[in-house]
């Protein structure tokens, strides 16, 4: 099953990204405004790149409806978060992921969707953080609202039904690892933009 393979074989890459993306600060309430801005910028770069390259490829291969791409786009939500922070997206350096195959598109989408799983919990933690009292909306982290569980289950079904058609689980898993590396690159760009300390 492709989702189990992705979870197990990208775990190390996932942990490496978590270690440098303020996960502990988010949950213990110590995240500061600059660090939050860095996370928003990194997610903007990542999701914008994935949606611009992977979405057309998935659509061309007849998977748009199956994967519910129109409901999963997050760039507009992140643009709203950037606007709330007073940031002009034109000032942000962007990056384009190397997605040229359907396997890569699915692997990158796995990482993009996985980031929504803890969204509701993260949004609640951020809302309680006194360092972020000036921030009143978390569009990205609240992207699916109460439907986050349903959207994830639907995504699992879509991935499990699409993978046999592609018949290249190893390629999808390799792309998942590449996607975590790409997010690390996005985070480096974001840290340079916000001038926060390296972690």
Image (cartoon, rainbow, N blue to C red):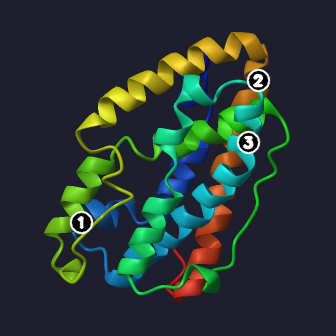
Q: Nearer the viewer, residue 72 or 135?
A: 72
Q: Which mark is residue 126?
A: 1
Tag in front: 2 or 3: 3
Q: What element carries label 2?
A: helix
- In the rendered image, the residue lying farthest to the right is 100
Decide: is 103 above or below 124: above
Residue sitting at x 77%, y 38%: 57
Q: Determine if residue 174 is in view.
A: no
* Residue at numbered disc 3: 56
* Residue at numbered disc 2: 170
User: Where does residue 84 sit, x and y in percent of width and height?
Assistant: 35, 79
User: Where does residue 113 sit, x and y in percent of width and height?
Assistant: 50, 40
Left or right: residue 80 versus residue 47 is left
Q: Quadrant of the N terminus?
A: top right
Q: What element carries label 1?
A: helix
Decide: is 34 above or below 181: below
- The quadrant in which residue 111 appears is top right
Q: Badge 2: how crowded within 10 Å, few (<14), some, or many (20+)?
A: some
Tag in front: 1 or 2: 1
């Amino acid at each position: 099953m492709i989702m189990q393979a992705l979870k197990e074989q990208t775990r190390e890459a996932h942990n490496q990204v978590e270690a440098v993306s303020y996960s502990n600060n988010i949950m213990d309430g110590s995240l500061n405004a600059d660090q939050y801005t860095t996370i928003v910028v990194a997610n903007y770069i990542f999701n914008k790149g994935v949606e611009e390259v992977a979405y057309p490829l998935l659509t061309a291969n007849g998977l748009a409806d199956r994967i519910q791409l129109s409901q999963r786009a997050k760039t507009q939500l992140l643009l709203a978060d950037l606007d709330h922070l007073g940031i002009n997206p034109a000032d942000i350096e962007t990056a384009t992921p190397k997605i040229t195959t359907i396997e890569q598109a699915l692997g990158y989408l796995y990482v993009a969707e996985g980031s929504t799983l803890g969204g509701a919990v993260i949004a609640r933690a951020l809302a309680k953080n006194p360092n972020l009292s000036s921030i009143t909306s978390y569009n990205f982290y609240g992207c699916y609202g109460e439907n986050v569980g349903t959207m994830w289950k639907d995504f699992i079904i879509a991935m499990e039904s699409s993978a046999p058609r592609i018949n290249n689980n190893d390629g999808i898993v390799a792309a998942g690892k590449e996607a975590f590396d790409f997010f690390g690159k996005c985070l480096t760009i974001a840290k340079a933009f916000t001038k926060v300390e390296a972690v």
